[in-house]
Each structure stands twice: as structure tokens, then as C-alpha cells.
Amino acid sequence: MIVGFSIFEKLKNNFDFNKYNKIEIIITHLHNDHAGSLSQFILYIWFVYHKKVTVFCNCEKIKEYLDITGTTKEAYELKTNTNFLEFIKTEHAKELDSYGFKLNLNGKTIIYTGDTATLDPFIPYLDECNEFYVDVSKSGGVHLKFVDIIETLRKIKSRNIDIFLMHLDDKNYIANLNNNEFYI
């Protein structure tokens, strides 16, 4: 579940959280577009549904982040790696630590880059991967520049790995280069 700063109202209005026994969130890094609604969401689930949220995060400052946003300690549980989730350290913004992850879910192995400027940390995990979620952008910088990695993605896809492009800063530009090769 994504809890970026603009997501809370969508979660609140589109899900009946009474249906769920467990509510778990994976946080890859603490930029607002990935964690901006985290505290608000945890507090909402705690006070409205009387449920604790499990937050999987390997970020060094996650506890401090939740403390300064006034998140009730009883409302959440922090966890890092588990038997179904492994965080993969990557490079994004120098100001904070960033991770992708390997997730084993319903018999599939999913690799999710999170926001990243490099594919290198994820390559060793692709041998066992079914789905690969990749951060791409038009301009690059702290994100992968799509035009620079398209050939690498084609090689990865040739291994029967489904590739999903995400964090699209210019969806039309990327769609035009993509030619329906990868999922958007």
C-alpha cells in the first residue's frame, strides 16, 4: 500500500478496512510522495477501526519520523526483513536511505526497485523473479532514465519476467518509447 502525501483520502474513501484482519505497509524511503500520509493513515486505522498497522521499513529514521508526526506508539508495529520480505539497499537521494525490496507473495517473487538511480543492486535477485517493478523517468537524476535502461529491460523481459514501469514523471513520453513492451 502506498501512503504518499496525496493518497490518504483515496484509501479512506475506497477501502472498507473492517474487511482486513491485518493491515501492512512497506515503506521504501521517507520522501513525502512515499510516506507523507503514513502517520495520518496509521492514526485513522487505530482510532476508527481499532487496528494496529504493521509498517515494514528499513529506513534509519522511521521511528523519528513517526514520533515527530505524532503517531501513537500503540497504533503501529515496526518490522524490517521477514521470511517473505527482504529490503535491498539502493541509491536515490543522498539525504536519506532508500530501499527496494524482494517480496514473496502468493507463490510469486516480486522485485520492486522503489525510487532508484541504479538497477545494479537488483540484478542478483532477478534469477528468481516473476515480476519486476521499475522506477523510470524521462530525465533521470535520482531516478532511472528510461531511455538509458530500455535495452537492459528488454534483456530482463526476455527471461520471461513481467516488467511494470512506475513513478512515471512523463507518462506520454515513456508510453511512446515503450511500444507496449512493458506494463505501465
Image (spheres, rainbow, N blue to C red):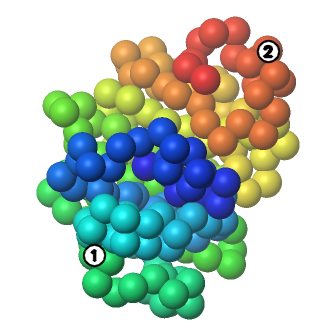
Is residue 146 or residue 57 the one in the foreground? 57
Labels in figure, total: 2
Q: Does 148 appear above or below 83? A: above
In the rendered image, the quadrant that contains the C terminus is top right
In this rendered view, identify the residue nearer to me: 64 or 13. Answer: 13
User: Element at badge 2?
Assistant: helix
- The structure residue drawn at horizontal position 38% and vertical position 58%, both measured from the top left corner, is 25
Residue denoted by label 1: 77
Using a 10 Å C-alpha cutoff, classify the residue at mark 1 as few (fewer than 14 neighbours), some (14 to 19) or many (20 or more): few
Query: Where's residue 51, x and y in %?
Result: 26, 66
Give residue 26's quadrant in the image: bottom left
Q: Is residue 182 visible?
A: yes
Q: Can see residue 98?
A: no
Q: Position of residue 176 (x, y in %)?
A: 79, 15
How dense is the environment of label 2, judged by Cα within 10 Å: few (below 14), some, or many (20 and up)? few
User: Which residue occupies the extreme top position in the image?
Assistant: 179
Q: Position of residue 37 (x, y in %)?
A: 57, 64
Checking the image for residue 28, the label placed there is none
Residue shown at 32% from the left, 49% from the top = 17
Tell which circle, 1 or 2, labels the residue nearer the N-terminal end.
Answer: 1
Tell me which residue sits at (56%, 84%) in the image. 69
The label shown at residue 176 is 2
What amino acid type should be assigned to the residue bearing mark 1? Glu
| Element type at mark 1 | strand
Residue 152 versus residue 95 in the image, above or below: above
Amino acid type at image mark 2: Asn
Q: Is residue 109 left or right of residue 35?
A: left
